[in-house]
Amino acid sequence: MRRIGFILFTVAVLVTLVKLGFWQMSRAQEKESLGHALKFRSEQMYYSLASLPTDPRWYSVTLRGQFDHSRAVLLDNQTFRGRPGYHVLYPFEVNRQWLLVNLGWIAAPAYRDQIPVLPEHHGEVMVTGMIAPPSTLLELAPEQFGTDFPLRVQNLNIDALSQQLDVSLMPWIVQIDPDSPLALEQTWIPVVMGPQKHYAYAVQWFLLAMAVSGLALWWLRRSKA
């Protein structure tokens, strides 16, 4: 009975390890596909919202419009070179349509109750950047917004921000081009971890499965003897 229990436990462990290995393989393939899509799409430039494809993520855009500086959004907990700060986002109006533009990183003041001095660009300006999905983190409960601007937020929940800003925002944001004269310090990258690390993790899981198999066979032979 002990021998059967050991075999069943070993099989369960092996199945789990192999599944983890194949999951990491699939994640690596997803990252490879995303990398190819990023390269191809980022080279395609669009000059109007009406001309964008159904899925506009990762395409480049050049748009003319106006910022609304009275309703700035500060994405909290953004560190750069060990310093805490924010990503500064402004609502941007293009032909009566609204979207959020991430200008980049700005350092936080020494005290939490202080707000950094935010840049302002008045009149019609040209924004060039890449369309990206809004960054989100796991939330245990819906985020509660304050009533004062700029808003300090932990996540870029577009639906909630649309209600708070009282405008209908596009379901994505524009990450401004680092070479734009409007850009702040750029810390955003589209892919955090490349496929190589996922492949390395997959190899680790498979090697662990082999090690467990070897130990199990050794124990079974020893117990049989």
Image (tube, helix red, strand yellow):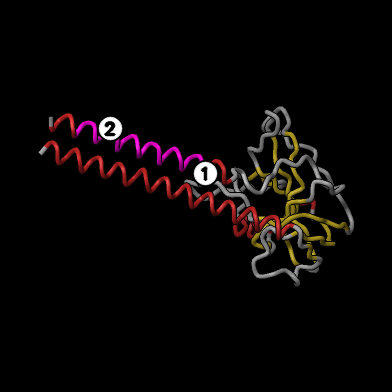
- Residue 217 painted magenta: yes
Q: How far from the left and from the top, in percent, is residue 65?
A: 83, 61
- Residue 102 painted magenta: no
Q: Image quadrant of residue 218? A: top left
Q: How far from the left and from the top, in percent, is residue 1?
A: 10, 39
Residue farthest along the bottom direction in this orientation = 50
Q: CA distance from mark 2 to mark 1?
A: 26 Å
Q: Main secondary structure of the magenta part?
A: helix
Write the residue at 38% across / 36% down: 208
Q: Which residue is mark 2?
A: 215
Q: Considering only order in the chain, which callout, 1 or 2, is on the residue closer to the N terminus?
A: 1
Q: How far from the left and from the top, in percent, is residue 69?
A: 80, 51
Please state if 103 lies on the left or on the right of 29 as rendered: right
Number of labels in the image equals: 2
Q: Which residue is mark 1?
A: 198
Relative depth, front residue between 92 and 211: 211
For label 1, the SS is: helix
Q: Nearer the viewer, mark 2 or mark 1?
A: 2
Q: Residues within 10 Å of mark 1 (few under 14, many from 20)?
A: many
Residue type (three-letter) at the residue carrying disc 2:
Leu
Relative depth, front residue between 59 and 216: 216
Write the residue at 63% across / 47% down: 191
Q: Image quadrant of residue 205? A: top left
Q: Which residues are magenta?
A: 199-220
